[in-house]
């Protein structure tokens, strides 16, 4: 199919729509060494197929340890579920120095940026169509989808939440596994 240019015709979720009314912050991670935890956090959203549609998953990871700090599942693309995941991560792990995000409207909204800026966090934004700027979160999505989510179809949000929770649990064995999974740069 790839050789002949054939592809399925269906609507795919587009999660990185920028809002022209929201500010764009500079990319701060170019040639930056990240030697310690809590120096740089990153987040992104992916879609999870369930019967009848999609749900959306936001995860917050530490760029040095590559551990998933917190995550949230939502049936809408409003910024509030991203804000909740970040607030819980900050309550447990403290405040990062830099928070790397893409230019999606959830992450550029005042609802998302105000609490981070008030806490003294520097915001760093990826460039448009630059998935490698947020490579560790993208690797997490690939691992989660291919190792867990694509193996069986989810009937509803509750089942998807349970399965994602099992995969992203933060027990000692899971934490070591994530460092290995997210560190691989294979797509």
Image: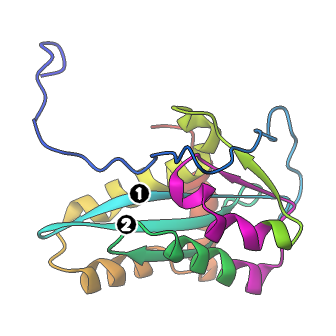
Q: Is residue 111 above or below residue 171?
A: above
Identify the residue at the far front of this view.
21
Query: Does 105 lie within the magenta span?
Result: yes
Numbered tag placed on residue 56 in the rendering: 2
Taking the image as shown, residue 57 lies to the left or right of residue 79, namely left
Quarter containing the N terminus: top left
Query: Does 108 lie within the magenta span?
Result: yes
- Residue 89 seen: yes
Dot 1 and dot 2 residues touching (CB under 8 Å): yes
Few, some or many residues within 10 Å of mark 2 (<14, 14–19, 20+): many
Choose top left, top right, bottom left or bottom right for residue 166. Answer: bottom left
Numbered tag placed on residue 46 in the rendering: 1
Residue beneath the point at 76% across and 39% down: 27
Where residue 173 sits: x, y (%)?
58, 76
Where residue 125 sits: x, y (%)?
69, 44
Secondary-structure class at tag 2: strand
Give the tally of numbered discs.
2
Boundaries of the magenta span: 89-116
- Residue 67 seen: no
Few, some or many residues within 10 Å of mark 1 (<14, 14–19, 20+): many
Q: In this orientation, which residue lies closer to the viewer: 96 or 27?
A: 27
Where residue 130 sits: x, y (%)?
56, 32
Quarter containing the C terminus: top left
Q: Is residue 55 above or below residue 35?
A: below
Give the alpha-carbon distance from disc 1 to disc 2, as whole Å.
6 Å
Residue beneath the point at 37% across and 66% down: 56
Secondary-structure class at tag 1: strand
């Amino acid at each position: 199919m790839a050789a002949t240019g054939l592809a399925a015709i269906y609507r795919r979720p587009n999660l990185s729509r920028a809002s022209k009314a929201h500010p764009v912050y500079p990319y701060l991670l170019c040639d930056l060494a990240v030697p310690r935890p809590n120096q740089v956090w990153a987040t992104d959203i992916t879609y999870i197929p369930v019967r009848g549609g999609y749900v959306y998953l936001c995860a917050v990871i530490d760029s040095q340890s590559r551990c998933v700090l917190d995550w949230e599942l939502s049936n809408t693309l409003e910024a509030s579920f991203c804000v909740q995941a970040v607030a819980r991560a900050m309550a447990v792990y403290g405040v990062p120095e830099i928070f790397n995000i893409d230019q999606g409207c959830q992450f550029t909204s005042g609802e998302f940026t105000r609490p981070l800026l008030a806490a003294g966090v520097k915001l760093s934004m990826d460039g448009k169509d630059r998935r490698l700027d947020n490579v560790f979160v993208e690797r997490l999505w690939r691992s989660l989808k291919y190792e867990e989510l694509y193996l069986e179809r989810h009937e509803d949000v509750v089942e998807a939440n349970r399965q994602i929770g099992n995969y992203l649990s933060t027990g000692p064995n899971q934490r070591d596994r994530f460092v290995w999974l997210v560190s691989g740069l294979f797509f």
